[in-house]
Amino acid sequence: MPRPMLLLALVSFLLLSGPGESRAQENPLPPIWFDDLTAGEAPTAADAEALVGFAAEVVGGGSPSLSSGPIAGLAADTRPRIVFLSACDPRGPGKTFLGSGAGLTEAVTRAAQLARERIGADFAPVWFKLDLVCEVRPAQKASPFWGLELDPGLQGIAFPRALGVAVLPDEIPARALLDGGRKLAPERWLAFFDECPWRVRDREGFRAATTVVSAFRVVSVFFDGTSASPLYRGHRLYPEPTAEQLLAFARAGGRYLVRGMNPEGRFTYLHRPDLDLSSSSYNILRHSGSVYSLLELHEATGDAEFLEAARRGVGYLMGFSKPAPAAGGDAAFIAEAGEVKLGGNALAIVAVAKLVEVTGERIWLPAIRKWGRWIRSVQTADGCFAVQKQSESGAPDPFISEYYPGEALLALVRLHALDPEGGWIDAAAKGAHWLIEVRDRGKKVGDLIHDHWLLYALNEIHRARPDPIYLSHAANIARAIRMRQHRDAPYPDWVGGWLQPPRSTPAATRTEGLAAACRLARDFGPREEAPADLEAIQLGVRFQLQTQIGPERAMMLRQPALVLGAFTRSLDDLEIRIDYIQHNVSSLLALRRLISEKE
């Protein structure tokens, strides 16, 4: 970075508004700080569960007893303790208060009393989170210019006592307080101080070019007013979900999509809840996939809101359909920003074919036939899709996608289900053979593409035109996917995921594909593969649910009600995109169908 920019960043970090003396008077020196904590018996999740209801009652104006109930046994604890109590009214961001004292009950009482004084009459919290500091690491230097040694999402940051600043592990991503490389983000700290002035004692203390910070860990629980749930990295660790729970989680994801759709049928494509910003960019291919997931939800729930939103989404999609005279006959394609993609046409067919399936409205068939004709026009005699991307004027692009061909096969077989005399199954079968016998020929199982769209397609093509080659190839792709799943991982919340660090959507697409492979193996063989597929799906979905924004994650963000139910990019990256929701919703519904049929 050029020296003038470094100086500008430093000035923005150091020139803080408000006199330090008045802030210090408002927020007195804490009686116990992080360097006062001593080694010894650490707080436990049971301690936090016992205390969180007590804290919520104090915030609500009650005077619960310290000498009875589950917290009575904590009276003997007099060690120096620090706790954080967060309270949230879903209409706005949660508020967090630090309390310290001799023993957990004293520290929690102080945090709860401070919360009661500060939250204001118009703030009616219904969600609470209690974090008990359990481990403090040796101090390290920090500045806007070099990275911290920090375990993201698992360690908070405490500045020196005189500054009075400490932030929780899950507050750091929720407020984007660190830039890439784990560097302090000056302007975001300033905004953070403005939002909650009680969180900083001495703003003037940040004038130093460097400061010293300590990293700390916490034991966390969330309380919804009825029951407490332990947290890890700010989210719950889920047991194996039931069919009813899967539907509830999927429905929450769908409602996020509906809330983010405008009257014309366009979704909020990408949202950063940590910065409270939405992108103006768009991707019509992912739009189609999201519409498809809403139709799956309507099929599963009967909820009219999903169907109504899907209809608007199809209406918006139709605005991107343009004639393709060069394809011969009555053909059309989906064009966006002058580009035509094989996958864009394919997912448009998949979405609108689902609308026909769930409503019986065959008025949409002419449109999807036109898109199907364009797909067939770019397929060679041996089944290869020679053009996967082109300009709107017809100029081919050399781009090759690993997933567009599988999407195209699924579109063709879905068209066949609605139009059996159209020859669509011939094109689908020919394309499947090319992928298996040419693209994937000679590959070791572990080297096969984790092609979830191809697994979807093989499951359906085999049912229409059986061929043993589909069964064996689907089983091999499923094995390749299972081989890469985290089973023994460095963190408990990585188990069930894929990649390093694991991400939400790669897990969802793989569990979607495994669900199709599982159905195929269960119904046609090899049947011994089905239980292994189901186990991997269940493990994967448990990982995925940790990336969904439930109340315990929403309460740390600026607009809890807006983002509730969305799926984030990963455990620590809170970016939300419509395809993250789409794939996770489809995955949850696929597992629900599998276990419902099994029962």
Image: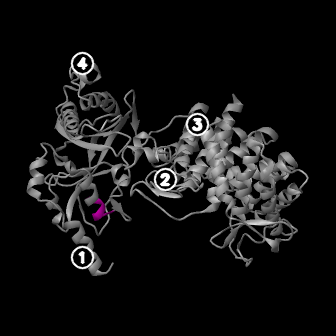
Question: Between marks 2 and 4, how big is the CA–CA gap?
Answer: 42 Å
User: Percent from the top left, x then y, of residue 461?
Assistant: 82, 50
Element under label 4? loop
Q: Say if the magenta span includes residue 139.
A: no
Q: Which residue is mark 4?
A: 68
Say which amino acid is labelled 1.
Leu
Say which amino acid is labelled 4.
Ser
- Dot 4 and dot 1 residues touching (CB under 8 Å): no
Say which amino acid is labelled 2.
Ser
Element under label 2? loop
- In the rendered structure, the answer to whether residue 580 lies left or right of residue 49 reads right
Q: Which residue is mark 3?
A: 246
Element under label 3? helix
Q: Residue at position x 60%, y 50% from top?
A: 582
Looking at this view, is 564 or 218 the one in front? 564
The mark closer to the camera, 4 or 3, is: 3
Q: Which residue is mark 1?
A: 7
10 Å crowding of disc 2: few (<14), some (14-19), many (20+): many
Question: Between marks 3 and 1, how big is the CA–CA gap?
Answer: 51 Å
Sequence-first tag of 4 and 3: 4
User: Percent from the top left, x then y, of residue 291?
Assistant: 64, 51
Q: Which residues are magenta?
A: 183-189
Find the residue positioned furthest to the top: 68
Q: In the picture, residue 87 is in which quadrant?
A: top left
Looking at this view, is 244 or 332 the one in front? 332
The mark closer to the camera, 3 or 2, is: 3
Element under label 1? helix
Say which amino acid is labelled 3.
Leu
- In the rendered structure, the answer to whether residue 40 lies left or right of residue 550 reads left
